[in-house]
Amino acid sequence: MDTRHIFPVKRPEGRTNCRLGRALLALCLVATLAACSVGPGATQSEPVTVHFGYFPNLTHAQALIGVANGAFQQALGPDVKLEPTVFNAGPSEIEAMFAGKLDIGYIGPNPAVNGYVKSNGDALRIIAGATSGGAVLVVRADAGIHSAADFEGKRIASPQLANTQDVSLRHWLLANGHQLSETGGKTSVLPTNNPDILTLFRKKELDAAWVPEPWGAQLQVDAGAQLFLDERDLWPGGQFATTELIVSRKFLSDHPDIVEKFVTAHVELTQWIIQHPDDAKTIANKEIQRLSGVALSQAVLDLAWSRLNVTYDPLQASVFTSSDWAFADGFLGDQKPDLGHLFDLSVLNEVLKAKNLPAIAQVQP
C-alpha cells in the first residue's frame, strides 16, 4: 500500500526554498541565453525560401549546372531554401512572378520586358545576363523552303506566344514581306511547346521552327531538319541576349544579401562553364535527362553547344532592339514603353568588383 498520502513527509523549509531558488535561476538563465541568441531587435524565423525558375534548355546552362551540383544552395547557405521550378517558356514564368510564386529566374529578354511593361516597371529587374546566341530557324527538309520568299503559306513554330524566339520570328517574317495569318496573311506562326515541335516535324504538320538550343540541334539530328538561319547572323558581332537573370523587385528590396549571394554563384558558374566546357556539357545534359527523362545524344549536345556562349553581361542594347520589335508586333501596348529602369546592375557590379572584374556599364534605351 502507498502510504504517502496518509503520512506526508515533512521537509525542512530551507531545503525547499533552495530547490525553488535553483529552479528559478535556471529559468532565468535559459531566457537570457535565448535573448542573446536572437540579438537586439531580431526575431526567430523560418529559413527564407527562394522560389527559382528556369527552363530545361542549354541556354539556361548556369541554372542546370547550379541546381545539379548544388552551387546555388551552397552559396545561399543553410538559412535559405532554394525551391526550383521548371518552365517551358518565358510568359508562363512571368505569370508565376506576378502571382508571387517566383523570386529569381532565368528567362528570355522579351518576356522580361513584357512583364516589366505590364507591371508598369514594378514587378521585376534584369540583374545579369546568362547566354548569348543559341537560337536558330530550321526547316523541314521536304518543305520546299530554300529562300525567305518560300515561307509564304508555311506553318512555323515558336516556343510560346511573345517569347523571345516568337518575337524574333515574327519580326523576321514581317521584314521579309510576309503577312501573318492572324492579320489576313497566309503564313502561320504556331506557338508550340518545344518537346511537341519534334513530334509535329516528324508528322509533317510543321514546316519550320525558330527555337532555342538544344531544340534546334535536336530537330536537325533527330528529325532531319535543315538549318536555315543562325540568329547570330542577324546581330552585330553575333552577340545578342538569349537568356537573362531576373529578380522580383520586392524580393530584391527585401533580401538584397540573398540576391548578392545568388549573383555571386551565377558569375562563378559562368566562369567555370567557360573554362570547363566539356564538363559543363556533361552536367547540363544529365540535368536535362533528370528533368525530361531523356538525355541528349552527343551529336545534338555538341551541335547545340557550339552555337551559344554563356555570359553574365546582359547585352542591354540587344534587349532594347528586341523590345522595339515586340512593340512593332503589338505585344507592348499602344505607346512605346519607357525601359529606363529595366536593368539594375548594381548587385552584379558589386560582385564583379569583389572579384576584380570589369564592371558592366548601365545603358539607357
Image (cartoon, rainbow, N blue to C red):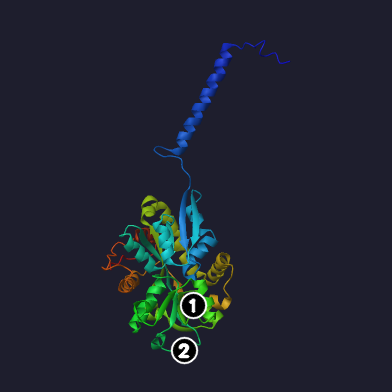
Does residue 345 appear to the left or right of 26 in the view shown? Answer: left
Res 177 → quadrant: bottom left
> Looking at the rendering, in which quadrant would you find the N terminus?
top right
Seen in the picture, residue 352 relative to 34 is either above or below; the reply is below
Seen in the picture, residue 315 relative to 246 is either above or below; the reply is below
- What is the secondary structure assignment of the residue under circle 1? helix
User: Could you say where residue 131 lies in the image, as x and y percent from the top left?
Assistant: 43, 70
Residue projecting furthest to the right: 1
Disc 1 target residue:
216
Q: Which sits in the foreground, 18 or 155?
A: 155
The amino acid pointed to by label 2 is: Gly
The residue sitting at 39% across, 64% down in the picture is: 128
Label placed on residue 24: none
Residue projecting furthest to the front: 184
Res 117 → quadrant: bottom left
> Looking at the rendering, in which quadrant would you find the C terminus?
bottom left
Upstream in the sequence, badge 1 or badge 2? 2
Instruction: Give me the C-alpha separation between circle 1 and circle 2.
Output: 19 Å
Does residue 331 appear to the left or right of 146 in the view shown? Answer: left
The residue sitting at 41% across, 58% down in the picture is: 97
Q: Is residue 342 visible?
A: no
- What is the secondary structure assignment of the residue under circle 2? loop
- How many labels were placed on the picture? 2
Does residue 8 appear to the left or right of 58 in the view shown? Answer: right
User: Could you say where residue 285 lies in the image, as x and y percent from the top left?
Assistant: 56, 69
Seen in the picture, residue 206 relative to 261 is either above or below; the reply is below
Q: Is residue 300 visible?
A: yes
Q: Which sits in the foreground, 130 or 51?
A: 51
The amino acid pointed to by label 1 is: Gly
Q: Which sits in the foreground, 69 or 299?
A: 299
Disc 2 target residue:
144
User: Could you say where residue 340 lies in the image, as x and y percent from the top left?
Assistant: 28, 64
